Image (cartoon, grey):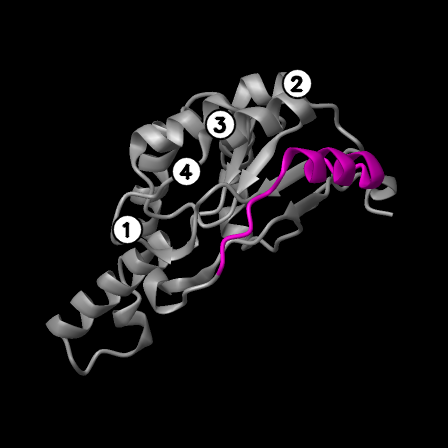
Amino acid sequence: MAHACGVPVEGELGHVPGVEGEDAEHHPGEMSYTTVAEARGFVDKTGVDFLAISIGTVHGRLQDRARLDMQRLRQINEALGIPLAIHGGSGLKDDQYRRLITHGVAKINYYTALTDIAGRQISENAERDRDSGYSGLAKGVAEAISGEVERCLRVWGSVGRAAEVMAQCRPWQPVEHVIVYNVLESAMADMPMVMAEGRRRLGIIPGV
Protein backbone atom coordinates (compact mmCIF):
# COMPACT_ATOMS: atom_id res chain seq x y z
CA MET A 1 0.00 0.00 0.00
CA ALA A 2 2.78 2.42 0.90
CA HIS A 3 4.73 1.72 -2.28
CA ALA A 4 1.61 2.28 -4.37
CA CYS A 5 1.53 5.80 -2.92
CA GLY A 6 5.24 6.40 -3.49
CA VAL A 7 6.05 6.10 0.22
CA PRO A 8 9.20 4.20 1.32
CA VAL A 9 8.92 1.90 4.34
CA GLU A 10 11.31 1.28 7.23
CA GLY A 11 11.18 -2.03 9.07
CA GLU A 12 12.84 -2.88 12.39
CA LEU A 13 14.35 -6.15 13.60
CA GLY A 14 15.83 -6.82 17.03
CA HIS A 15 15.29 -4.83 20.22
CA VAL A 16 17.04 -1.61 21.29
CA PRO A 17 16.50 -1.22 25.06
CA GLY A 18 16.08 2.02 26.99
CA VAL A 19 13.69 4.98 26.78
CA GLU A 20 14.13 8.05 24.59
CA GLY A 21 15.06 11.19 26.53
CA GLU A 22 16.04 9.40 29.77
CA ASP A 23 19.16 7.85 31.29
CA ALA A 24 19.67 4.50 29.60
CA GLU A 25 20.86 2.75 32.78
CA HIS A 26 17.52 3.49 34.47
CA HIS A 27 15.72 1.33 31.92
CA PRO A 28 17.65 -1.92 31.65
CA GLY A 29 16.49 -4.42 29.09
CA GLU A 30 17.86 -7.39 27.28
CA MET A 31 19.57 -6.53 24.01
CA SER A 32 18.17 -8.54 21.13
CA TYR A 33 20.65 -8.33 18.27
CA THR A 34 19.54 -8.54 14.66
CA THR A 35 20.84 -11.63 12.90
CA VAL A 36 21.86 -11.84 9.27
CA ALA A 37 19.44 -14.69 8.56
CA GLU A 38 16.49 -12.86 10.12
CA ALA A 39 17.32 -9.67 8.29
CA ARG A 40 17.61 -11.38 4.90
CA GLY A 41 14.35 -13.30 5.37
CA PHE A 42 12.46 -10.24 6.61
CA VAL A 43 13.56 -8.02 3.72
CA ASP A 44 12.81 -10.74 1.15
CA LYS A 45 9.28 -11.27 2.49
CA THR A 46 8.31 -7.66 3.10
CA GLY A 47 10.19 -5.63 0.50
CA VAL A 48 10.97 -2.84 3.00
CA ASP A 49 13.18 -0.05 1.71
CA PHE A 50 15.16 0.54 4.93
CA LEU A 51 15.90 -1.75 7.87
CA ALA A 52 16.57 -0.59 11.43
CA ILE A 53 18.85 -3.07 13.14
CA SER A 54 20.08 -3.72 16.66
CA ILE A 55 23.89 -3.86 16.96
CA GLY A 56 24.48 -2.45 20.47
CA THR A 57 22.93 1.03 20.68
CA VAL A 58 20.44 1.93 23.43
CA HIS A 59 17.73 4.54 23.69
CA GLY A 60 18.46 7.44 26.06
CA ARG A 61 21.64 8.91 27.53
CA LEU A 62 24.83 6.85 27.57
CA GLN A 63 27.35 7.11 30.41
CA ASP A 64 30.10 5.16 28.66
CA ARG A 65 31.20 4.44 25.12
CA ALA A 66 28.71 2.18 23.35
CA ARG A 67 29.96 -1.28 22.40
CA LEU A 68 28.84 -1.68 18.81
CA ASP A 69 28.98 -4.98 16.93
CA MET A 70 30.54 -3.67 13.74
CA GLN A 71 31.16 -7.15 12.35
CA ARG A 72 27.43 -7.86 12.59
CA LEU A 73 26.70 -4.55 10.85
CA ARG A 74 29.12 -5.36 8.01
CA GLN A 75 27.60 -8.80 7.49
CA ILE A 76 24.03 -7.46 7.43
CA ASN A 77 24.99 -4.69 5.03
CA GLU A 78 26.70 -7.13 2.67
CA ALA A 79 23.73 -9.51 2.79
CA LEU A 80 21.00 -6.93 2.19
CA GLY A 81 22.37 -4.08 0.11
CA ILE A 82 19.65 -1.66 1.27
CA PRO A 83 20.02 1.45 3.47
CA LEU A 84 20.20 0.62 7.18
CA ALA A 85 18.90 2.66 10.12
CA ILE A 86 20.12 2.95 13.71
CA HIS A 87 17.75 3.66 16.58
CA GLY A 88 19.23 4.98 19.83
CA GLY A 89 21.85 7.02 18.00
CA SER A 90 22.42 9.70 20.65
CA GLY A 91 25.66 9.65 22.60
CA LEU A 92 27.90 7.81 20.16
CA LYS A 93 31.38 9.10 19.41
CA ASP A 94 32.17 10.81 16.11
CA ASP A 95 34.36 7.93 14.93
CA GLN A 96 31.51 5.49 15.65
CA TYR A 97 29.09 7.50 13.54
CA ARG A 98 31.56 7.50 10.67
CA ARG A 99 32.07 3.73 10.89
CA LEU A 100 28.30 3.16 10.93
CA ILE A 101 27.89 5.24 7.78
CA THR A 102 30.81 3.51 6.08
CA HIS A 103 29.02 0.17 6.56
CA GLY A 104 25.62 1.06 5.16
CA VAL A 105 23.82 3.16 7.78
CA ALA A 106 21.85 5.91 6.03
CA LYS A 107 19.57 7.05 8.88
CA ILE A 108 20.45 7.73 12.53
CA ASN A 109 17.75 8.48 15.10
CA TYR A 110 19.02 11.27 17.36
CA TYR A 111 16.15 12.26 19.65
CA THR A 112 17.62 12.32 23.16
CA ALA A 113 20.59 14.56 22.35
CA LEU A 114 18.33 17.18 20.76
CA THR A 115 15.81 17.18 23.62
CA ASP A 116 18.66 17.59 26.11
CA ILE A 117 19.88 20.66 24.22
CA ALA A 118 16.36 22.09 24.22
CA GLY A 119 15.98 21.35 27.94
CA ARG A 120 19.24 23.10 28.81
CA GLN A 121 18.24 26.18 26.85
CA ILE A 122 14.85 26.32 28.58
CA SER A 123 16.53 25.93 31.99
CA GLU A 124 18.93 28.77 31.21
CA ASN A 125 16.03 30.97 30.14
CA ALA A 126 14.15 30.16 33.36
CA GLU A 127 17.22 31.01 35.45
CA ARG A 128 17.52 34.39 33.76
CA ASP A 129 13.84 35.24 34.16
CA ARG A 130 11.80 33.14 36.59
CA ASP A 131 8.61 34.99 35.63
CA SER A 132 9.05 34.32 31.95
CA GLY A 133 6.12 32.93 29.95
CA TYR A 134 6.23 30.26 27.28
CA SER A 135 7.71 32.53 24.61
CA GLY A 136 10.51 33.58 26.93
CA LEU A 137 11.25 30.01 27.99
CA ALA A 138 11.38 28.82 24.38
CA LYS A 139 13.63 31.64 23.23
CA GLY A 140 16.75 30.35 21.49
CA VAL A 141 15.65 26.70 21.50
CA ALA A 142 15.30 26.45 17.73
CA GLU A 143 18.70 28.05 17.21
CA ALA A 144 20.36 25.72 19.72
CA ILE A 145 18.87 22.64 18.06
CA SER A 146 19.76 23.99 14.61
CA GLY A 147 23.40 24.34 15.67
CA GLU A 148 23.56 20.73 16.83
CA VAL A 149 21.85 19.48 13.68
CA GLU A 150 24.43 21.33 11.58
CA ARG A 151 27.25 19.78 13.64
CA CYS A 152 25.81 16.30 13.05
CA LEU A 153 25.42 16.91 9.33
CA ARG A 154 29.09 17.85 9.16
CA VAL A 155 30.26 14.85 11.19
CA TRP A 156 28.06 12.49 9.17
CA GLY A 157 29.27 13.85 5.83
CA SER A 158 25.93 15.24 4.64
CA VAL A 159 26.85 18.89 4.15
CA GLY A 160 26.67 20.26 0.62
CA ARG A 161 25.24 17.07 -0.89
CA ALA A 162 21.65 18.11 -1.65
CA ALA A 163 22.28 18.40 -5.40
CA GLU A 164 23.97 14.97 -5.38
CA VAL A 165 20.96 13.43 -3.69
CA MET A 166 18.51 15.12 -6.06
CA ALA A 167 20.45 13.81 -9.05
CA GLN A 168 19.78 10.26 -7.81
CA CYS A 169 16.05 10.82 -7.15
CA ARG A 170 13.11 10.22 -9.44
CA PRO A 171 10.12 12.45 -8.74
CA TRP A 172 7.10 10.23 -8.20
CA GLN A 173 4.66 13.05 -8.76
CA PRO A 174 5.17 16.82 -8.95
CA VAL A 175 3.90 18.80 -5.99
CA GLU A 176 2.29 22.13 -6.67
CA HIS A 177 2.09 24.69 -3.89
CA VAL A 178 -0.06 27.73 -4.62
CA ILE A 179 0.08 30.75 -2.31
CA VAL A 180 -2.68 33.34 -2.48
CA TYR A 181 -2.26 36.57 -0.54
CA ASN A 182 -3.85 40.00 -0.33
CA VAL A 183 -1.78 43.11 -0.98
CA LEU A 184 -2.53 46.66 0.00
CA GLU A 185 -3.04 48.84 -3.04
CA SER A 186 -0.26 51.14 -1.84
CA ALA A 187 2.21 48.21 -2.01
CA MET A 188 1.29 46.98 -5.48
CA ALA A 189 4.20 48.76 -7.14
CA ASP A 190 6.67 46.70 -5.08
CA MET A 191 5.08 43.32 -5.89
CA PRO A 192 7.11 42.46 -9.03
CA MET A 193 10.33 42.95 -7.05
CA VAL A 194 9.01 40.88 -4.12
CA MET A 195 7.93 38.03 -6.43
CA ALA A 196 11.25 38.06 -8.29
CA GLU A 197 13.16 37.81 -5.02
CA GLY A 198 10.90 34.94 -3.91
CA ARG A 199 11.62 33.04 -7.12
CA ARG A 200 15.35 33.68 -6.73
CA ARG A 201 15.43 32.34 -3.17
CA LEU A 202 13.33 29.27 -3.99
CA GLY A 203 15.38 28.59 -7.09
CA ILE A 204 18.48 28.04 -4.97
CA ILE A 205 16.88 24.98 -3.34
CA PRO A 206 17.60 21.74 -5.27
CA GLY A 207 14.38 20.18 -6.54
CA VAL A 208 12.36 23.37 -6.52
Residue 149 as seen in the image, left or right of residue 132: right
Secondary structure category for the residue under label 1: helix
Numbered tag placed on residue 169 in the rendering: none
Residue extent of the magenta highlight: 30-49
User: Residue at left 51%, top 53%?
Assistant: 16
Q: Is residue 167 visible?
A: yes
Q: What type is the residue that disc 2 sits on?
A: Gln
x and y percent of residue 103 in the render?
51, 23
Q: Earlier in the sequence, mark 4 or mark 1?
A: 4
Circles 3 and 4, Cβ within 8 Å, touching? The answer is no
Q: What type is the residue that disc 3 sits on?
A: Gln
User: Residue at left 17%, top 66%?
Assistant: 124
Residue at which label 3 appears: 71
Is residue 107 shown above or below 21?
above
Residue at which label 2 appears: 168
Q: Earlier in the sequence, mark 3 or mark 2?
A: 3
Secondary structure category for the residue under label 4: loop
- Cα–Cα gap, marks 3 and 4: 9 Å
x and y percent of residue 92 in the render?
33, 41
Circles 1 and 2, Cβ within 8 Å, touching? The answer is no
Residue at which label 1 appears: 144
- Cα–Cα gap, marks 1 and 3: 35 Å
Is residue 64 shown above or below 206?
below
Q: Quadrant of residue 76?
A: top right
User: Residue at left 62%, top 38%?
Assistant: 35
Residue at which label 4 appears: 68
Number of residues whose C-alpha sits closer than 10 Å to that of mark 3, classed few (under 14), some (14–19) or many (20 or more): few
